[in-house]
Amino acid sequence: MATTSPFDFIPLNPRDYLVLFSLTNGERHGYGIVKEVEEQSGGDVRMDPSNLYRSLRRLIQKGLVEESEIRPNEDSDERRRFYSLTPLGREVVELEASRLSRLTEVARGRHLIPDSQGAT
């Protein structure tokens, strides 16, 4: 079987990036992912459950996310499924974050968005 490179996944679909990004601080269940995506996007992106689970299935098939067997705590509802990044998934989200950072710097250089001090 051929080794999969993180570069094979770049550029990521924006919603897939947000799902992967939401898992960078550890395992989350579906509702936790939805809330994290909404928070990190400043409310611009809202994921309904069907879109979320479609994205998760695709990311699992690609080997970027896995369903966790271990629950973060004993109080967790047995019905909740928890998800985490695979090592490949972490590499991919880091690579995409770097790519987006480079594009952001180019946009700043072209005065399309303010620099870090607020000047355009």
Image (tube, helix red, strand yellow):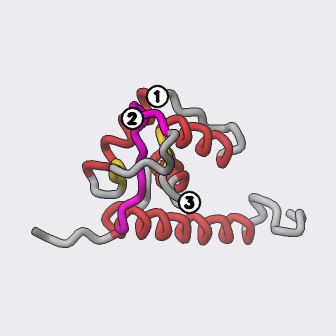
In which quadrant of the rendered image does the N terminus lie?
A: bottom left
Residue 53 image-quadrant placement: top left
How many residues crowd mark 2 within 10 Å: few (<14), some (14–19), many (20+)? few
The residue labelled by disc 3 is 25
Residue 77 is situated, as x and y percent measured from the top left of the image, at: 46, 33
How many residues crowd mark 3 within 10 Å: few (<14), some (14–19), many (20+)? few
Task: State the residue at coordinates (24%, 68%).
Answer: 4
Residue 118 image-quadrant placement: bottom right
Q: CA distance from mark 1 to mark 2?
A: 6 Å
Mark 1 secondary-structure assignment: helix
Q: CA distance from mark 1 to mark 3?
A: 21 Å
Range drawn in magenta: 76-87
Looking at the picture, which amino acid does disc 2 mark?
Tyr
Q: Nearer the viewer, residue 9 or 24?
A: 24
The residue labelled by disc 1 is 49
76 up-or-down from 95: above or below: above
Mark 3 secondary-structure assignment: loop
Mark 2 secondary-structure assignment: helix
Q: Nearer the viewer, residue 67 or 38?
A: 67
The residue labelled by disc 2 is 53
Q: Nearer the viewer, residue 50 or 85?
A: 85
Whether 83 is among the magenta residues is yes
Which dot, 2 or 3, sits closer to the camera? 3
Task: State the residue at coordinates (49%, 39%).
Answer: 76
Q: Nearer the viewer, residue 26 or 88?
A: 26
Residue 58 is situated, as x and y percent measured from the top left of the image, at: 31, 44
Judged left or right of residue 93, residue 32 is right
Whether 85 is among the magenta residues is yes
Judged left or right of residue 105, residue 7 is left
